[in-house]
Image (spheres, coloured by chain):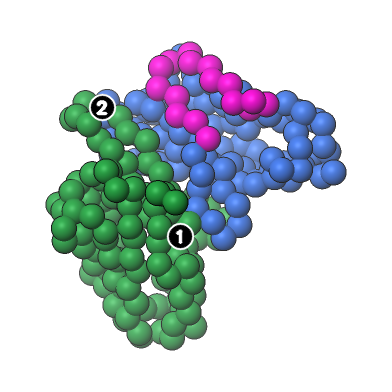
Amino acid sequence: DTGVSQNPRHKITKRGQNVTFRCDPISEHNRLYWYRQTLGQGPEFLTYFQNEAQLEKSRLLSDRFSAERPKGSFSTLEIQRTEQGDSAMYLCASSLRRGVSSTDTQYFGPGTRLTVL
Amino acid sequence: TQLLEQSPQFLSIQEGENLTVYCNSSSVFSSLQWYRQEPGEGPVLLVTVVTGGEVKKLKRLTFQFGDARKDSSLHITAAQPGDTGLYLCAGVPGAAGNKLTFGGGTRVLVKP
């Protein structure tokens, strides 16, 4: 399977703990996106990378959240001092952007469901 | 802030009936994508529309992008229980934007 993969699929943690999620994009894709989806809502953008550079962060991404893509391949999303409001599905997507003025289609992974108790 | 509104929020129909889901915005999008999402899974891409007025067909699904690239619709003919799911529209704002702006989704239930 050469799609986007995410690990773990489910994470249950206690409030105040740190958690880290991993995303492996489609191999030739240069862009990687993180979204958050709460129950009954559409996904909301968190941040994205082009290769290893983090180019945009949403205001939703508080200082407790950090994302990295050190080698331009896989990415990690860490949440420090988790709160109950962080409970959500965290989705990763990747795409291939060929040029500045082109559009690209984003392909999503299965998501990581986080539950903060 | 780009805002995409989907309607209806929920649709329950019998197998064999037709349905239409709408996605509307006051803003222009360079492209618009439709996804279907099953519970506990990530969205799966159905189609991307780019050109104003474009119509794409995927078996029993017909997608249309408005002439002004501000709205889109998804029409399903002769719905089947396998069409059950959350349908999401998502737009890329502006000339060549980056992040997707999603609608709130339409939950479709097709009863056998």
* Residue position for label 1: A111
In the image, A8 versus B91, the foreground residue is A8
| Residue type at the position of mark 1 | Gly
Q: Is residue B10 left or right of residue A75?
A: right
* Residue position for label 2: A102
The colour chain B appears in is blue
Give the total number of marks visible in the rendering: 2
Q: How far from the left and from the top, in percent, is residue A52?
A: 16, 53
Q: Earlier in the sequence, mark 1 or mark 2?
A: 2
Q: Residues within 10 Å of mark 1 (few under 14, many from 20)?
A: many
Letter of the chain shown green in the rendering: A
Which residue is at 30% across, 66% downward? A77
Which residue is at 69% across, 40% downward? B83
Range shown magenta: B46-61
Q: How far from the left and from the top, in percent, is residue B81?
A: 76, 43
| Residue type at the position of mark 2 | Ser
Q: Is residue A108 magenta?
A: no
Q: Is residue B56 magenta?
A: yes
Q: Residues within 10 Å of mark 2 (few under 14, many from 20)?
A: few
